[in-house]
Image (cartoon, rainbow, N blue to C red):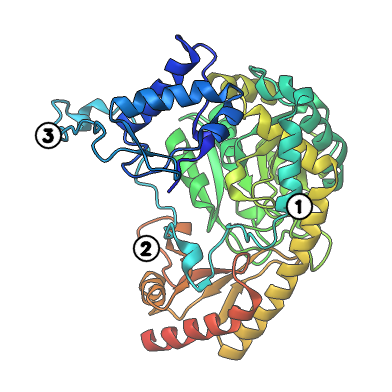
């Protein structure tokens, strides 16, 4: 094995002659364990060309290391790390010691213990991964994303990449959101009314921190987005759960005295129900009647391949009481962690100040890369490609569900990327998921989407965003066969 020449570089602040620097680089590599006995070093010519120095300088450095038994020379084969070279010191691991701190008393607030659905880290190795929110690498436009990232790394964008915006955001990204993304949802906003966040979940956390206290009352859909439930519980606010129906959140069921209403009208999470226009207007009227605010998580609106999406609640808002949450993480890839908040200036001002005190702003390079990806049309092309593929996968899954006799509990009227399923009442889908996992099938049990001690345990979610179409029928058949063993 040859040590890559890229391993070597001359540090601009290094002391000593070039020859001594060559010796130090190699000796440190051996002493640190990075270079192993028997590994071949780059030739003197190749290393000299890489470092931009004289070949004789490299040769003299190698010769000195030969005399100190760090290296050996093998005829015409080159230089190798000596078998008798000094070895890195071996340190015994520190013994385990018990903390003297009583952490049960020292921890003032607890944030662990949430009930997010668990999925294996190696989910992509499973043959039938019906899990939600994971990207399909075969659909993503790697080439253009790489090009945009390289463009954002260029000298012209050095300032946006490295500048500490403090509480501001990349103006190119904000401009695109204001001029292109929001108008597609019927929303008109000024740059001062938009804040970039680390995904929709971060946007929901900022919103909760700004709007809610222990004395305030929030309404949450049930079943619900489990991360939002955890965020609201951490705020210590009074929380009411409102059961959704086939059209999403029913306004008349919202209890009086609510200060903030959280809703996912485009594709309710997790049932995927789409709120019709009449109910959207009724929800705005109900909020106005109670003088409540609405937080609209515009969840999966891009995946509307069956029919055009309904206008956002924010677009119908004449009072400024709707706060809009958008995200690029679902339509690009979840690891991107980039979203945005849209709201009235007094709210955005406080959310911006809170964000600055916690993380200042999302990384400038990521913001500029996304700005290029959006403005050059790559994002729209990707969404079209994903919509076409998901439409085909949805048809395949719906047919497989029909053929096997499984029961759909909820499906969005405009698209989405999953089905909300119901098993017969005796079935606990946690047990079903465990049995299926042994057959290389992953599903998402529904218990964590409900509140209380007597939760519904016979629901589960099947997503088709990361499973090839040609595997859907067999995977659904395995679910049906295993389910029949539990009934």
**Image location (x, y in percent) of residue 453:** 35, 58
Tag 3 residue: 95
Around disc 1, counting alpha carbons within 10 Å, would you say few (fewer than 14), some (14 to 19), or many (20 or more)?
Answer: many
Instruction: Describe the element under mark 1 as helix, strand or loop.
Output: helix
Q: Position of residue 474 (x, y in %)?
A: 55, 84
Q: Is residue 436 above or below residue 373?
A: below
Q: Residue 454, which numbered label?
A: 2
- Of residues 345 and 42, which is closer to you in this image? 42
Q: Is residue 298 above or below residue 416?
A: above
| Number of marks drawn | 3
Question: Where on the picture, by quarter, is residue 396?
Answer: bottom right
What residue is shown at x 79% (from left), y 33% (from top)? 319
- Asked if the residue at tag 3 contacts the one at tag 1, i.e. Cβ–Cβ closer than 8 Å, the answer is no
Q: What percent of the width, then of the height, locates residue 325? A: 68, 41
Seen at 82% across and 47% down, the residue is 185
Q: Which residue is mark 1?
A: 280
Residue at image location 60% in from the left, 60% down from the top: 244
Can you say whether 311 is above or below 456 in the image? above
Secondary structure of the residue carrying tag 2 is: loop
């Amino acid at each position: 094995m040859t040590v890559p020449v890229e391993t070597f570089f001359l540090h601009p602040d290094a002391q000593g002659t070039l020859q001594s620097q060559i010796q130090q680089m190699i000796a440190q590599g051996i002493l640190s364990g990075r270079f192993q006995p028997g590994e071949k070093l780059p030739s003197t010519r190749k290393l000299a060309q890489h470092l931009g120095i004289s070949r004789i300088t490299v040769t003299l450095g190698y010769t000195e290391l030969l005399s100190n038994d760090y290296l050996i020379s093998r005829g015409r084969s080159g230089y190798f790390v000596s078998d008798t070279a000094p070895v890195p010191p071996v340190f015994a691991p520190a013994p385990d010691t018990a903390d003297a701190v009583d952490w049960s008393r020292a921890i003032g607030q607890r944030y662990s213990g949430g009930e997010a659905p668990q999925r294996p880290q190696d989910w992509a190795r499973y043959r039938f991964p019906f899990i939600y929110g994971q990207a399909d690498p075969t659909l993503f436009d790697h080439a253009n994303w790489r090009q945009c990232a390289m463009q954002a790394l260029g000298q012209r964008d050095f300032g946006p990449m490295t500048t500490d915006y403090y509480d501001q955001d990349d103006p190119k990204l904000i401009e695109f959101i204001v001029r292109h993304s929001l108008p597609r949802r019927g929303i008109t906003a000024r740059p001062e009314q938009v804040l970039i966040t680390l995904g929709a979940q971060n946007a929901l956390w900022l919103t909760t921190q700004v709007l809610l206290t222990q004395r305030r009352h929030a309404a949450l859909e049930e079943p619900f987005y489990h991360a939002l439930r955890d965020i609201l519980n951490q705020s210590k606010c009074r929380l009411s759960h409102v059961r959704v129906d086939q059209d999403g959140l029913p306004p008349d069921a919202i209890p009086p005295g609510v200060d903030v209403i959280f809703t996912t009208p485009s594709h309710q999470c997790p049932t995927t129900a789409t709120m019709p226009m009449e109910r959207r207007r009724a929800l705005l009227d109900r909020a106005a009647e109670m003088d409540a605010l609405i937080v609209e998580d515009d969840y999966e609106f891009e995946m509307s391949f069956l029919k055009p999406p309904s206008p956002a609640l924010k677009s119908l808002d004449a009072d400024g009481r709707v706060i809009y949450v958008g995200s690029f993480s679902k339509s690009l890839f979840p690891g991107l962690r980039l979203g945005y908040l849209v709201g009235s200036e007094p709210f955005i001002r406080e959310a911006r100040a809170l964000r600055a005190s916690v993380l200042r702003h999302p990384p400038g390079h990521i913001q500029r890369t996304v700005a290029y990806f959006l403005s050059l049309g790559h994002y729209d092309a990707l969404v079209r490609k994903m919509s076409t593929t998901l439409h085909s996968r949805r048809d395949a899954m719906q047919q497989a569900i029909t053929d096997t006799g499984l029961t759909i509990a909820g499906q969005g009227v405009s698209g989405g990327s999953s089905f909300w399923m119901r098993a017969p009442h005796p079935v606990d889908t946690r047990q079903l998921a465990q049995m299926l996992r042994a057959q290389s099938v992953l599903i998402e049990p529904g218990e964590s989407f409900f509140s209380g001690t007597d939760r519904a345990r016979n629901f589960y979610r099947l997503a088709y965003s990361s499973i090839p179409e040609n595997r859907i029928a067999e995977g659904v058949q395995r679910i049906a066969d295993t389910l029949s063993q539990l009934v």
